[in-house]
Amino acid sequence: MAAKVVDKFANLAALHVVQAVANTAKYDSFAFPFSIMDKVGLLIHRIEYQIAGLQHLNTALDCAEAGICTAKDMADPFDITRPELVDYHVMIREDIGTAASGILHEAVKVKDFSKLPGGGILVAPNPLYAFLHTGGAADVMNVRVRMYYTYMELAAEDYWQLVESRRIVSG
């Protein structure tokens, strides 16, 4: 893909995704100022996840998954083979020894993509969602997502190839 870097320095986008109901998937959209006609891509260099409410994962195999995707309301957010899934992070409670002796603690999970070819993961800016999905949680949870990226200008054919690779356009 032929791409022209638009930004000299990385930009920062952040979302706070809060579940309304425990053990459901919640998606919130990033608000980038580009339409599908602008032929601009986001080159994601780094993503940080901070899942809060881990105390609600209080039995063995309770889990929380946070991530970035290009399709709202994916049928199975845990399916890592889906092309709409850009990145994800999963926390699973495991009890060791005596029941209820498990512990979960993680301040921030950092995913650094800067060493990938091209310097990151290239995606279309719209639609792009941060999500949280839980299973077995005793109450609602939330996640804070910070994403560092630069804008890339793409040729029309490269942009449409990018869009189709994430199945944004159905056919």
Image (cartoon, rainbow, N blue to C red):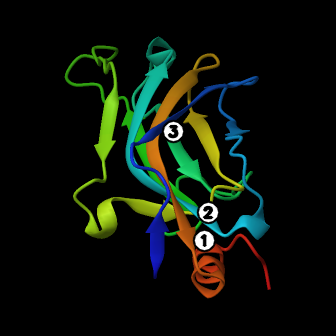
Residue sitting at 69 percent across and 25 percent down?
19
Give the residue at x 76% y 23%: 20
Kind of residue sitting beneath label 2: Ala
Q: Which quadrant of the figure has residue 92?
A: top left
Residue type for callout 1: Arg
Under mark 3, the amino acid is Ala
Q: Are marks 1 and 3 in contact (CB under 8 Å)?
A: no
Residue 140 locus on image (x, y percent): 64, 19
For the point 42% across and 61% down, which residue is it?
121
Distance (Cα) linking label 1 and label 2: 9 Å
Query: Residue 48: x, y in percent?
Result: 39, 34
User: Rounded to the nearest whole Å, what is the CA distance between mark 1 and mark 3?
Assistant: 18 Å
User: The C terminus appears in which quarter of the rendering?
Assistant: bottom right
Give above or below for 92 relative to 4.
above
Task: Compare marks 2 and 3 and give the one earlier in the sequence.
Answer: 3
Badge number at residue 66? 3
Front-most of residues 40 and 121: 40
Mark 1 touches mark 2? (CB < 8 Å): yes
Residue shown at 59% from the left, 36% from the top: 132
Q: Characterize the local packing of mark 1: few (<14), some (14-19) or many (20 or more) Cα atoms within 10 angstroms.
A: some
Q: Is residue 150 above or below residue 1?
A: above
Read off the residue under disc 2.
124
Of callouts 1 and 2, the N-terminal one: 2
x, y percentage for residue 135? Answer: 57, 35
Residue 80 in sight:
no
The residue closer to the viewer here, 66 or 148, is 148
Element on which disc 3 rests: strand
| Residue indicated by mark 1 | 166
In the drawing, what numbered circle is on residue 65?
none
